[in-house]
Image (spheres, rainbow, N blue to C red):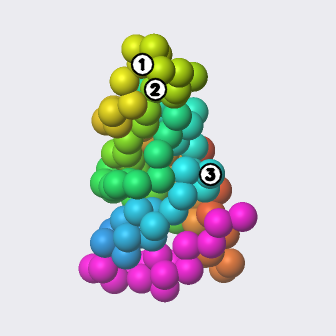
Amino acid sequence: MIRLTKALDAWGTPDFEDVLKNEITRMKVDQLPLQQGLTASSHALDDNIRAIIIAVSESENFIQVKAGIFYSGIIAGCNCADDPTPVEAQSEYCEVLLDIDKKTAETGITLVAD
């Protein structure tokens, strides 16, 4: 389980969104549903993940955040000498919902379906 402790510590302060975006950008592909959010490529990359905060709300036990994630992916081919598939990174974007537990900072992350 992912714990966004710095974001939870910043909750209720003007720094919350910046702290949360920083924590998101430090995550790896296996911690975010980026592979499932691909539209232009077949393999999500860890480098250059950026986030924007779209909406924030609060319930009794959770901080709910809708975030947009900008990242890159590649079209993975067989890497044969005659493979015409380009290995250039493609820009990708998806939206996720984060549910941050107010007591433990444990965070569930789900992909928002179009």
Is label 1 in a helix, a strand or a loop?
loop
Which residue is denoted by mark 3 in the rendering?
A: 30
Q: Are marks 1 and 3 in contact (CB under 8 Å)?
A: no
Marks 1 and 3 sit apart, C-alpha to C-alpha, by 24 Å
- Comparing 3 with 27, the one in front is 27
- Comparing 77 with 73, the one in front is 77
Which label was assigned to residue 85? 1
Marks 2 and 1 sit apart, C-alpha to C-alpha, by 7 Å
Q: Which quadrant of the structure image shows residue 41?
A: top left
Is label 3 in a helix, a strand or a loop?
helix
Which residue occupies the extreme left position in the image?
Answer: 14
Marks 2 and 3 sit apart, C-alpha to C-alpha, by 18 Å
**Is 83 a magenta residue?**
no
Instruction: Locate the C terminus and report the quarter of the image it occupies.
Output: top left
Q: Amino acid at mark 3?
A: Asp
For image coordinates 58% across by 65% down, the residue present is: 100
- Comparing 101 with 90, the one in front is 90
Q: Are marks 2 and 3 in contact (CB under 8 Å)?
A: no
For image coordinates 42% across by 19% down, the residue present is: 85
Res. 39 in view: no
Q: Amino acid at mark 1?
A: Thr
Q: Which residues are magenta?
A: 1-16
Residue 24 position in % (x across, y down): 45, 63
**Is 11 a magenta residue?**
yes
